[in-house]
Amino acid sequence: MDATLALFYAEGMAPIYGQIQTIRDASLSLEILDQMALPNVVDQQALHCLTRLSGQQLRFDTRFIGYDESAPGSLCIRLEMPCSFSYLQRRGAFRLDLIPRRPVSCFLSVKGDEIEISVADVSLGGVGLLGVIPGVALVPGLILKGARVELSSGNCLIVDLEVRSQADYFLKNGIKTIRTGTQFKALSPRDAQTLMRYINRVATQQS
């Protein structure tokens, strides 16, 4: 099945991400991507979950019922399947707003030159770029090929970005600029896992 699921056990906390492996016997098998977060999941009486199936975001409550020993080589737990789901009309991924201590840089190739552009936020869906690129109209539908996204953890993603939207954006000092919303094109499973771990770690440290 291989769908991403975000776990919460308290309001306002950063999500703990996992990959749904199987659904059977009134339970689902979930591989926890951040093993350090596992004790927090196991100790909770109630877990709140968000996932996305067929383009629709779902929310449900569940509980930990044991480890999945049928998945050798990975850390999988079993969660009780709920009796009902809530369908939400919201953005498809948790967005991490960045602070100066945790910057993310994006480098774009423009006419043979590499240009750095600031990043306002990052999610599993894409990145929010700040400012303008001289000589480039960042219009919806434009594909920015081979963008290099450098995370403050030292990891680097080479991705294609599709421009989806533009809007005014006010910096904390009151200066107005432009935020360009971009979407990852075909993010690899390895890069998605790297990004999930980064978002989870930084969001926990910022909370």
Image (tube, rainbow, N blue to C red):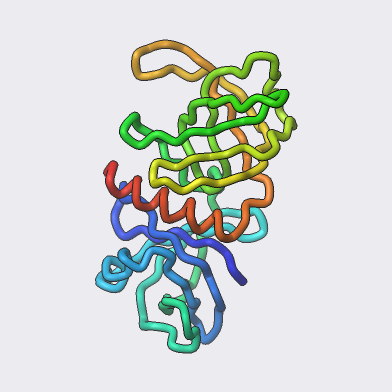
Q: Nearer the viewer, residue 8 or 132?
A: 132
Q: Nearer the viewer, residue 89 or 94?
A: 94
Position of the C terminus by quadrant: top left
Which quarter of the figure has residue 134? Answer: top right
Position of the N terminus by quadrant: bottom right
Residue 24, compared with residue 40, is above or below; it is below
Across and down, in percent, residue 3 comes to 57, 64
159 relative to 88 in the view: left or right: right
Q: Residue furthest top?
A: 175
- Total label count? 0
**Residue at 48% of width from left, 19% of height from top?**
169
Which quarter of the figure has residue 190? Answer: bottom right
Residue 93, compared with residue 65, is above or below; it is above
**Residue at 38% of width from left, 83% of height from top?**
67
Across and down, in percent, residue 94 comes to 47, 46
58 relative to 137 in the view: left or right: left
**Residue at 68% of width from left, 51% of height from top?**
186
Q: Nearer the viewer, residue 9 or 154?
A: 154
Across and down, in percent, residue 10 comes to 29, 55
**Residue at 57% of width from left, 21% of height from top?**
167
Across and down, in percent, residue 20 comes to 53, 70
Residue 185, compared with residue 131, is above or below; it is below
Residue 25, compared with residue 89, is above or below; it is below
